[in-house]
Image: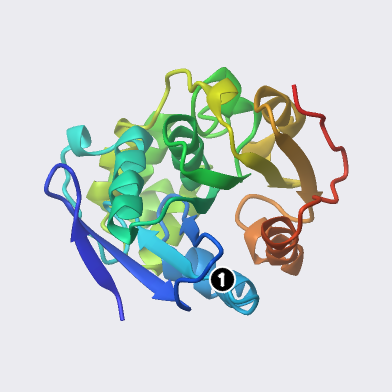
């Protein structure tokens, strides 16, 4: 049964829980752009894989997404704003520590949260890589911000059928998303430096080998003091659905040693 809380600025955020609190910190999952917790985490089996290990799992729907409130003013958006929502959620849970997993837009949110909130014990950043270091967010060089906004707000899908951003329009329509709210988020997308060097959490950078939004992931792993890198099969939309994604999460969240393709030592 979804639950709701009122965030710092009055926006209502919906979240779901699986399992019960225990002696190990909960795992919080933050989804990517245009989808929601159900699409990003439940349907691919990620929630079941983590919950089966006995962990308490919490997955919010970001503002503007899923069952959460959907303002259309860009001033109510941005990954830094969503990071504040996560802080309020952790306060609500009343825990001293939490493990945090974010994908794509959620990866940016997770990085900002971990850089500013010392309660994040373990961190997984998926679906974003060097652009997080170089541009402070999802790589807009792959799909320009204006192109995505135009596709989201177009009245007729056939008019923008040839757009490289059409996959995001199709995804938004498939999940019944509010496209005006999504356009507001794109307008406010984070584009300033993140103090990645201040992240104290053990970190896993997890990306699909064919994901253009996660190019050069070794640069992101090198920018975070206690980070490891792992590549799995898949592109941006497919990697999270590959069984290797959930397997890598469980391995990282439940063991002391991360078995990585290219481990990077702490700085």
Of the pair 106 and 150, the residue shown nearer to us: 106
Q: In this view, does 68 lie above or below 161?
A: below
Nearest the viewer among 251 and 143 is: 251
Q: Is residue 134 left or right of residue 222?
A: left
Residue at the far front in the pictured view? 23
Residue where numbered disc 1 is placed = 55
Identified at 52% across, 51% down, the residue is 100
Q: Residue furthest left?
A: 10
State the residue at coordinates (48%, 42%).
110
State which quadrant residue 78 falls in: top left
At 26% from the left and 57% from the top, the residue drawn is: 178
68 with respect to 98 (left or right): left
Q: How many labels does the image show?
A: 1
Quadrant occupied by the N terminus: bottom left
- The quadrant of the image that shows the C terminus is top right
Is residue 88 visible in the rendered image? The answer is yes
Secondary structure at badge 1 equals: loop
**Where's residue 42, x and y in %?**
51, 73
Front position in the image: 23 or 156: 23
Give the class, few, some or many, for how many residues have Cα within 10 Å of label 1's Cα (few <14, many ≥20): many
Report whether 45 appears left or right of 105. Answer: right
The spot of residue 111 in percent (x, y) is: 51, 36
Residue 77 x %, y %: 26, 38
Q: Is residue 209 visible?
A: no
Give the residue displayed 66% in from the left and 41% down from the top.
202
Q: In this view, does 177 lie above or below 77?
A: below
Tell me residue 249's x, y (percent). Answer: 68, 59
Structure colour scheme: rainbow
């Amino acid at each position: 049964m979804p639950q709701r809380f009122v965030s710092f600025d009055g926006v209502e955020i919906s979240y779901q829980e699986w399992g019960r609190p225990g002696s190990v910190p909960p795992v919080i999952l933050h989804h990517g752009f245009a989808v929601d917790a159900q699409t990003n985490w439940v349907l691919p089996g990620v929630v079941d894989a983590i919950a089966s290990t006995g962990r308490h799992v919490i997955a919010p729907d970001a503002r503007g997404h899923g069952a959460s409130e959907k303002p259309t003013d860009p001033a109510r958006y941005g990954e830094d704003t969503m990071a504040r929502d996560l802080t309020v959620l952790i306060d609500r849970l009343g825990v001293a520590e939490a493990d945090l997993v974010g994908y794509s837009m959620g990866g940016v949110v997770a990085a900002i949260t971990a850089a500013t909130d010392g309660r994040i014990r373990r961190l997984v950043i998926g679906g974003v890589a060097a652009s997080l270091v170089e541009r402070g967010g999802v790589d807009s060089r792959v799909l320009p911000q204006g192109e995505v906004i135009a596709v989201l707000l177009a009245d007729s899908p056939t008019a923008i059928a040839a757009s490289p951003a059409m996959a995001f329009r199709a995804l938004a329509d498939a999940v019944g998303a509010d496209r005006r709210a999504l356009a507001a988020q794109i307008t406010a997308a984070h584009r300033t430096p993140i103090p990645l060097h201040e992240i104290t959490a053990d970190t896993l950078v997890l990306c699909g080998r064919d994901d253009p939004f996660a190019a050069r992931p070794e640069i992101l792993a090198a920018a975070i003091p206690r980070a490891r890198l792992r590549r799995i099969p898949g592109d941006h939309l497919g990697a999270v659905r590959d069984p290797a994604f959930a397997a890598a999460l469980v391995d990282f969240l439940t063991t002391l040693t991360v078995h990585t393709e290219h481990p990077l030592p702490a700085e």
